[in-house]
Amino acid sequence: MKYSVKRIRIPKALVAIVFGLIAFLVLDNTARADVFKWVRIGQMWSAIFDSGDMSRPLGSYRQFYYNGNRFMENIAWRVAVRDWTDERGATWGFKTSGTSVYNGEEAFDNMPLDVDGFTIRRYVRFQPPSISVQGAPIQPFFPLEGDEVNPDYIDSSGGKGADQLIESWIRTSVGITIHQKVFVFSQVNHDDYVLYDWTFKNTTGQYLTPSGIQVDLPAQTLNGVYFALAAWVNQDVGNFGWSTTYGEREGDSLRVAYNYPAWNRGQQYDTFGNPDQTTGFIKEPSYVGIAILHVDKSVDDPTDDREQPHVFASGLQKYTTAQQHDQNNPTVTELEYSSFHYGFPELVEGQKAYYFGLNVPAEGRVRYQSRMDERKIKWVQDATKGRGAIYMSLGPFDEMKAGDDFRVVYAVVGGSLSREMRWDIGQRWKNGTLTWEGEDKIPPVGQAFPDLIPTAVDRAKDNWVATGKDSLFQNIYNAEWAVRHNYNVPKAPPPPSIEVWGRPDRVQILWGSESESASDFAGYRVYRAVGSPDTTFTVIHESLGNSVHSFDDITAQRGVSYYYAVTAFDDGSQNQPGTENGLRPGESVESGILYNRTTEPVSLTRAPGNALADIRVVPNPYNITAAEAGLQFPGENDKILFAGLPPECTIRIFTISGDLIKVLEHTDGSGDEPWSDLTTETRQIVVSGVYIAHVEIPSGESSFVKFVIVR
């Protein structure tokens, strides 16, 4: 298959593919610094490490979380040079350095300390708001070591519109030091990406490590310098997504490698988007990828090279030669370098990408592989061994003298249906009324295998899910706009501190006046979510000006858990409009909900009961079908409520055969106590049956209540 292609630039987070590719990354004999800062103010979350490591943090797969349970499982990066001289004077034909999917390579000694002894710093634009529920503070602790409120430093570092800047310096073993700047935004048009602005500087020459070890790496001009990224993208539920690229063909307007939902083998229904079979809710609609936003043309030309990345591929998997990367093995480093420079063997229709084939001569390789989802393979598992990965290399940069540098900007980006649309579309798909009237957006695999989409309603659902690609691309355009405009993204007023109190007849929300420091401040909005802090927040109140700092939610229902946030918005007078950043002239900008949303539930309180005989269990019987349909406690499918309780008591729950399975201590002085997860003391889910609750007050008086659970 022939394409008219152009060279593009390369994002830096595409990890899995480059790893598998060249045994890319596992260096067990060195230690990571493992110092990191969390980014959690927008829709895209990430742990930013001082070493630039983007592999599994803290044993977790959740490196970048995005709406719909899709996330970057691992990301790896490499820098590579040719004709390089080490500290002993030995010449290497090829040398590589960087991090892997599982382990970082650079030792702690390679993380330069600043004057205060920190390897990474986080600068925030304003003091984070305080958050409390029923008087208990729940906001993340601030400041941690290396944190400070410093808007002037953010602005002077090029991030005029950024909410936060995370900064570190990464000294690689090839003598290139990377100045890592990570910018994040809470503004609604820019909160779906985390932006990495990296400057690569030739710092070869003598230096001291933090522990005082002298390194005599000869000062030298570096040639053939590449920067490469590889990534796995995955989902919580174990079905694999398709990986693909956009930007290597004539007419492509962006540079991105991304992953999106796949159909699941062995199911008897259309699984695109992973709809829930009971409710129809679209569980996995998200498109997530790595976008290249800027690559210097050379060390002497800082303009953006639209011909980058140099190599672009999708769907790669598995190691090439060694199962462990060894940066001191010339054979391994040459194989790695060859993938950055020559690319990979082309894959024909129906061919499975099991290995990278780096033993194939250069003339047998291509820089732009055919896209994984266009190879006419029905199932992801038949297209690659395991999860398909994305990969790109940027370069080469030549004549990089000591002191010279080049800059690369990339972003981890997501796009998805909103949670409201996931419910609406899923429910209409489930009841057979869903339609689609726009242009066809079905991905290539669905076009090639129409039996995956058996009905018109299925096709409508799949078209709606596929609009996640439009959202992804729009968010990348917004990120490019931010880079071209020196990150001068319109800023919202600071979010206010909030207090939330459950009262017998209302939920009371109070907030501070911090937002009013903004010269264009216009007012406040109060949001509420039901059943979970990770669901939809809906506006329930808006006030203009600075005269109102409280709201009573009198629509709250007893027994239901609520979560709240208060945002501030401006009058739009100081916001620069633009097609790509989503703003229209005079449009208002609002602070982010995630800054001060409550993550602990609040409910209406009930006065304590007067008699043990009045204690009730609600609902009784508990029925899982009714719970999942939202007929009991919305958003809390596994919950029952003990009502009419005394102000203090112990609730012991027994099976009908007398086995004690759960103990609840009721101490808040109200008349209600939830059993919020319906699990035993050993975290086992309770089964259908009759249960008995023994309620005992401190004086020793007690009562029994019988209830039924149906699953």
Image (cartoon, grey):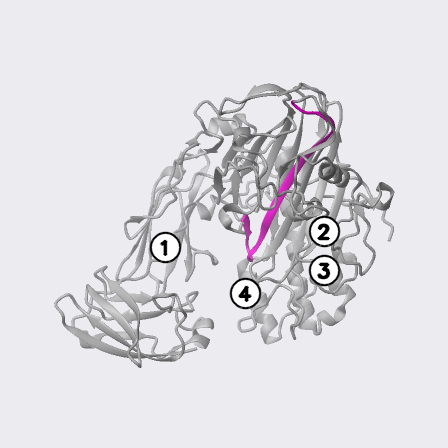
Q: Which label's residue is closer to the chain start, 3 or 2?
A: 2
**Which residue is under mark 3?**
441
Q: Position of residue 450 (x, y in %)?
A: 76, 69
> What SS does tag 4 mark?
helix
Give the label on residue 600, or none: 1
Q: Which label's residue is closer to the chain start, 2 or 1?
A: 2
CA separation in Å, label 1 and label 4: 24 Å
- Disc 1 residue crowd, few under 14, some 14–19, many 20+, Cα 10 Å: some
Residue under the point 61% across and 59% down: 285
Q: Is residue 704 above or below residue 220?
A: below
**Which residue is under mark 2?**
316
Amino acid carrying label 3: it is Lys
Query: Quadrant location of residue 581?
Result: top right
Amino acid carrying label 1: it is Glu
- Disc 4 residue crowd, few under 14, some 14–19, many 20+, Cα 10 Å: some
Q: Is residue 236 left or right of residue 517?
A: right
Q: Which label's residue is closer to the chain start, 3 or 4?
A: 4
Amino acid carrying label 4: it is Trp
**Which residue is under mark 4?**
423
Q: Position of residue 109 (x, y in %)?
A: 53, 29
Camera sees residue 51: yes
Q: Position of residue 333 (x, y in %)?
A: 71, 37
Q: Position of residue 167 (x, y in %)?
A: 52, 32
- Nearer the observer: mark 1 or 3; the answer is 1
Question: Which residue is more in the foreground, 240 or 574?
Answer: 240
Which range of residues does the magenta coloring cover? 63-87
CA separation in Å, label 1 and label 3: 40 Å
Q: Which label's residue is closer to the chain start, 1 or 3?
A: 3
Residue under the point 43% across and 25% down: 116
Amino acid carrying label 2: it is Leu
Q: Which label's residue is closer to the chain start, 4 or 2?
A: 2
> What SS does tag 3 mark?
loop
